[in-house]
Image (tube, helix red, strand yellow):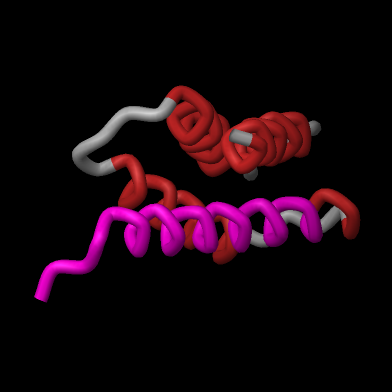
Amino acid sequence: MKFPRTFGRKKELENIQFLYEVLDKMAKNGVLREDVIEEVYWTLKKLLKGKYDAEILEAFEEVVTLRAKLSMEKNPEKHLMVAKEMLAKYLEG
């Protein structure tokens, strides 16, 4: 059974809203959890498959950078903030 495009868009927005809230909570708590970053990474990658959106792509790139630098960088939170901002821009429309 095929669902109307609006169903897919609604689900996508719900997923992005959830990711935004997860990143926001980590930013507010000042705690970066590797397992959460991993989940955000895989979810964004899945959302990007087969389409292109500048804000989601930039958020994904920041999460990739955050993921790679988490153990090496003194201030990886800046990537978390940019990823969160890009998801907020996407949600604003």
Q: Is residue 21 magenta?
A: yes
Q: Relative to residue 49, is residue 4 depicted above or below?
A: below
Image spot of residue 62 (x, y percent): 56, 31
Image point (43%, 48%), residue name:
44
69 and 17: which one is in front? 17
Q: Quadrant of the N terminus?
A: bottom left
Q: Relative to residue 45, is residue 2 depicted above or below?
A: below
Q: Is residue 73 magenta?
A: no
Q: Quadrant of residue 79?
A: top right
Q: Quadrant of the C terminus?
A: top right
Residue 88 visible in image: yes
Q: Relative to residue 73, is residue 28 depicted above or below?
A: below
Q: Is residue 42 left or right of residue 76?
A: left
Question: Residues in magenta?
Answer: 1-26
Image spot of residue 28 (x, y percent): 89, 53
Image spot of residue 61 (x, y percent): 48, 30
Q: Residue furthest bottom?
A: 1
Q: Is residue 68 left or right of residue 81?
A: left
Q: Quadrant of residue 50?
A: top left
Q: Relative to residue 79, is residue 25 depicted above or below?
A: below
Q: How many marks?
A: 0
Q: Is residue 81 left or right of residue 60?
A: right
Q: Quadrant of residue 87?
A: top right
Image spot of residue 70 (x, y percent): 63, 42
Determine the main secondary structure of the stretch shown in magenta: helix
Residue 72 visible in image: no
Q: Residue furthest left?
A: 1
Image point (13%, 68%), residue name:
2
Image point (71%, 33%), residue name:
85
Q: Is residue 77 left or right of residue 13?
A: right
